[in-house]
Amino acid sequence: MTGEKAATKSWRDSFWRSEDGLELHYRDYPGPEGSRAIPALCIPGLSRNARDFHDLALHLAHDRRVIVVDLRGRGDSEYAKVGSTYNPLQYAQDLQRLFVLADLDRAVFIGSSLGGLVTMILAMLDPARIAAAILNDIGPVIGRAGLERISGYVGQGRSYPTWMHAAWALQDMHQDTYPDWKLEDWLAEAKRAMELGNNGRITFDYDMRVAETFQQGLADAAETEIWNGFDALKGKPVLILRGEHSDILTGATARDMVSRFDGVELVTVPRVGHLPTLSEPAAVEAIDRLFDERLPLAIKAGPGDQG
């Protein structure tokens, strides 16, 4: 896959407006002109943004349109006027408006962590929009240990004088998640997760109020199971990617998901925790398999020209 700097004109920056008036951003990788392959829609995690999916989007855009969103309060999307709207139901409702405004009929959803929760919620609200689902290290039951670990760093508003300092800080925080990464990997991760602020400091690229809602709902999130959302994906191809050492998607929950109904594939990404970056060979091979082999012929192409 190609780095972002090598293909800076490979997408269009586009925007849609939420029901409460926020300007929300997405990257639109158009794919080949005239392609009718069903599009992919990528949704990042809690504190993440569209940059996470750049390499995967380039890979998939060889034959299809790829939409990568910045959820409200992240990346180039506007920050919420009311902090309580940073919740999965609101994100799903925002995406319902995107489908209309971006001229999408349905898509293969690729949801990382929170993005997978949003996918399952949307499956309950508007299942016809989802042709297939790729759930990246997330399931209907969320590991309490993982939630407590995330609560230890999300929303702290740290800043750094240089990109190298930012990379070292991420390495200190997440070395156990990616034990094989070199310094250049941590530097690339910093440039995905952070931005250069107006004061010249390197800061995380999300509204810190995202953490307030997360912290308030921490106990509920650990106790709430959304099997109804997962069950709403029945009849569609589903791929579950699980980091071998994940503390968010436990092995037991992943196995329960596979046994829930037919058409669910589980792939373990070796030597990573929460969450796989989707650049790992095991993840890419599984994603390609879903698009190339597991989508029924009836839905490989949309009803109109989606390219």
Image: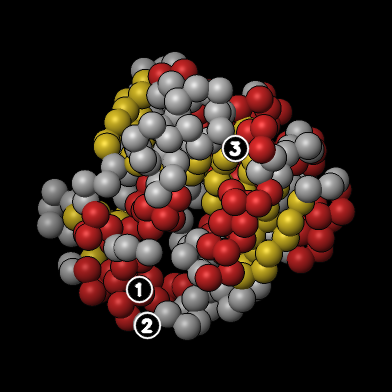
Q: Nearer the viewer, residue 268 or 108?
A: 108
- The vertical placement of 142 against 303, above or below, is below
Q: Are marks 1 and 2 in contact (CB under 8 Å)?
A: yes
- Amino acid marked by disc 1: Trp
- Amino acid marked by disc 3: Lys
Q: Are marks 3 and 2 in contact (CB under 8 Å)?
A: no
Q: Nearer the viewer, residue 238 or 198?
A: 238
- The vertical placement of 219 against 306, above or below, is below
Query: Marks 3 and 2, Cα distance to the nearest angstrom?
Result: 38 Å
Residues packed near mark 2 inside 10 Å, few (<14), some (14 to 19) or many (20 plus):
few
Q: Residue 228: where, in percent of width, then height?
A: 79, 35
Q: Residue 82: where, in percent of width, then height?
A: 42, 27
> Disc 3 or 2, which lies upstream in sequence?
2
> Disc 1 or 3, which lies upstream in sequence?
1
Residues packed near mark 1 inside 10 Å, few (<14), some (14 to 19) or many (20 plus):
many
Q: Nearer the viewer, residue 201 or 167?
A: 167
User: In the image, what residue occupies the spot 13% across and 49% down?
Assistant: 198
Which residue is identified by label 3?
300
Query: Marks 1 and 3, Cα distance to the nearest angstrom?
Result: 36 Å
Q: Residue 77: where, in percent of width, then height?
A: 33, 35
The quarter holding residue 266 reads bottom right
Colour scheme in use: secondary structure
**Is residue 186 toward the left or the right of residue 56 in the image?**
left
Which residue is identified by label 2?
182
**Is residue 202 toward the left or the right of residue 15 in the image?**
left
Which residue is identified by label 1?
186
- Amino acid marked by disc 2: Lys
Disc number for residue 138: none
User: In the image, what residue occupies the spot 44% across and 41% down?
Assistant: 64
